[in-house]
Amino acid sequence: MHSHLVGHGSFLPPKIVTNDDLSKIVETSDDWIFPRTGIKQRHLVENETTADLGEQAALKAIESAGWTVDQVDLIILATSTPDMDFPSTATLIQNKIGATKGFAFDVQAVCSGFIYALSTADLYLRAGKAKRAIVIGAERMSALLDWTDRTTCVLFGDGAGAMALEAKEDDSAGIIDSILYSDGTFSDILCAGSPEHAKTYMNGREVFRHAVSKMADVSKEILEKNNLHFSEVTHFIPHQANERIIQHIGHDLGLSTEQVISTVKNHANTSAASIPLAFDEIACAGKVKKGDLLLFTALGAGITWGSNLIRL
Ligand code: UT7
């Protein structure tokens, strides 16, 4: 069995906050934010919940796959901003979209969450434990920010993206491989909800250092392991945290500007939602086609990191 990527969707809350808007609430400016991060604006929730964001992205992915909701038998949500302690937000989304079959659960790997969730769904589909999976990354990062801390509040945004995966015998396409890593010795460089840091705390320089080296290394590893070369990658979609990190990795891997996808300018860092949001944007723009080779990679708090390699 192979997990074919057959649908995609995304949802951004309508409220847009620009760098100039932020300069009215904290001591910052577009002149500081844009050159260091590539971010110009972010979408932020007003009353929307994580389940609301995930619901909209999931419904679009189901429609784009040409499925009906009752065909979905697995829902995996990657999020660090669940709506409740329990039940899982995945079950809230299951209820909202009206799915009644199969099972739903959350995965927590922060900015690497979508990579982890896609890998998990792939294993269920390959094992014959499910046939049609919706994998969602949905985040309300705004809920985890200290809006008086300019070092973090300018970096994040809210949103959701989703992909529809279908188990098929056809081995000409599908998720080729996933590689996941974590190293808990760095759990203190990026965290929220600890006794010391109720809201998001980040040692930006340390995170930057890990991000550029580990995302590049795991991208090389997954291609080498599968006897593929960077020249064969159609779209490289790294986690969208910072334009400088994205460009640094693209340069390190010898990728062309056409191969490297960046949406951080308009979305900021949407954590687990960033990769499916970026994919949905290029797919809706007609930039993907059958046979394309996709390489996703992310690094997030934990620290966690990894890659997925997919043939469309
Ligand atoms: O998904 C998780 C992944 N996260 C990331 O990938 C983020 C990785 N890190 C980064 O992208 C960068 O470290 C940042 C963009 C977060 C920060 O850039 P930096 O060049 O490392 O700046 P810094 O933190 O060293 O701060 C430099 C100066 C400081 O002022 P002083 O102490 O030199 O006077 C900060 O207080 O910039 C100041 N500063 C700001 N000034 C205006 C920090 N944030 C701001 C701000 N506006 N928003």
Image: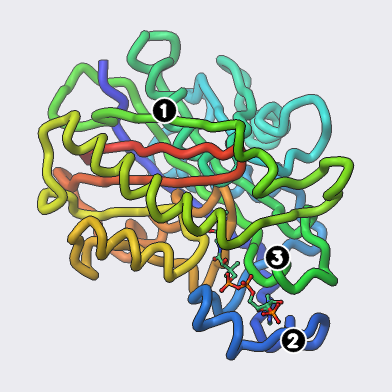
Q: Quadrant of the C terminus?
A: top left
In primary-sequence order, the first of circles 3 and 1 is 1
Q: Residue at x 51, y 41 (%)?
A: 112
State the residue position of label 1: 119
Q: Amino acid at mark 1?
A: Ser
Residue farthest toward the right in the current orientation of the protein: 195
Q: Position of residue 71 (x, y in %)?
A: 47, 23
Kind of residue indicated by mark 2? Ser
Query: Is the residue indicated by label 3 positioned so its CB lies within 8 Å of ligand 1?
Result: yes
Looking at the rendered image, the disc whose residue lies closer to the viewer, 3 or 1, is 3
Q: Nearer the viewer, residue 71 or 127?
A: 127
Per the model, the C-alpha gap separating discs 3 and 1 is 29 Å
Q: Are marks 3 and 1 in contact (CB under 8 Å)?
A: no
**Residue that badge 2 annotates:** 23
Q: Amino acid at mark 3?
A: Thr
- Which residue is identified by label 3? 152
